[in-house]
Image: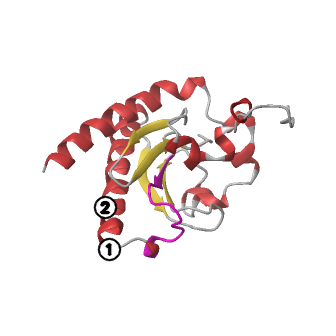
């Protein structure tokens, strides 16, 4: 449904998938895990690797890690590690075939700084497991069968709870 010239400013809803960072900033991102010191942690839109999560920087107009001050950069990377720790703890408990996490800051498609946390599992095809997740076929990133769905909500809640526990411990020191 399009926006008509007679509609008021509040009558147009932006789909959170079209503006992840804006939705998180407005408190409207349905896959939010936590608001961290340096950014918003959210579940990934696609879950063909269960537990995939993203950290988006709070700092406006930042595209590259090096656009941040050194202090901001350190904070962002610490938060990325905390997010990874939460994903690792939860996913390892849900699937003992979890082998490792891949952390990636790409900067190729989004116009804001974000970092990806990808759990990697023993059940993945060997040719895909030994390379970056970007070797997965393009349809895995867009297919409805791999999209975040209600069935992933218990995992999101568990990661959120674990992340809040870890943040409380880490931020207290």
Residue 161 in percent (x, y) is at 33, 31
- Residue 7 in the image: above or below residue 122: above
Residue 32 lies, with reference to residue 36, above or below; the image says: above
Residue 61, position in %: x, y? 53, 65
Work out whether residue 117 can be spotted: yes
Task: Say whether residue 106 is magenta.
Answer: no
Q: 107 or 154: which is nearer to us? A: 107
Report if residue 61 lies within the magenta region.
yes
Sequence-wise, which precedes: disc 2 or disc 1?
Answer: 1
Instruction: Name the mark on residue 70.
Output: 1
> Residue 130 at what x, y percent from top left?
54, 62
User: Distance from label 2 to label 1 (Cα)?
Assistant: 9 Å
The residue located at (46%, 32%) in the rendering is 156
Residue 96 in sight in this render: no
Q: Which contiguous range is marked in magenta?
A: 53-66
The N terminus sits in image quarter: top right
Task: Name the colour scheme.
Answer: secondary structure
Residue of label 2: 75
Kindly identify the residue that appears in the image at 57 percent across and 47 percent down. Answer: 22
In the displayed orientation, state which residue is furthest to the left.
Answer: 173
Q: Is residue 59 left or right of residue 134?
A: left
Q: Nearer the viewer, residue 72 or 10?
A: 10
In the image, residue 153 sits, relative to residue 32, either above or below, namely above
Residue at the (66%, 36%) spot, across then down: 147
Is 154 placed left or right of 5 in the picture? left
SS state under label 2: helix
Q: Is residue 39 above or below residue 166?
A: below
């Amino acid at each position: 449904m399009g926006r008509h010239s007679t509609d008021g400013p509040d009558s147009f809803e932006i789909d959170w998938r079209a503006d992840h960072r804006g939705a998180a900033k407005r408190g409207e991102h349905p896959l939010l895990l936590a608001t961290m010191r340096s950014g918003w942690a959210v579940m990934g839109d696609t879950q063909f690797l269960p537990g995939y999560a993203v950290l988006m920087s709070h700092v406006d107009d930042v595209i590259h890690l090096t656009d941040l001050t050194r202090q901001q950069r350190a904070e962002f990377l610490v938060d990325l590690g905390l997010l990874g720790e939460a994903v690792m703890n939860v996913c390892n408990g849900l699937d003992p075939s979890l082998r490792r996490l891949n952390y990636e800051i790409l900067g190729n498609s989004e116009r804001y700084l974000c970092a990806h946390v990808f759990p990697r599992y023993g059940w993945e095809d060997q040719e895909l497991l030994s390379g970056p997740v970007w070797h997965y076929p393009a349809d895995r990133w867009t297919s409805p069968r791999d999209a975040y769905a209600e069935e992933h909500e218990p995992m999101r809640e568990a990661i959120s709870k674990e992340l809040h526990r870890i943040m409380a411990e880490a931020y207290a020191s």
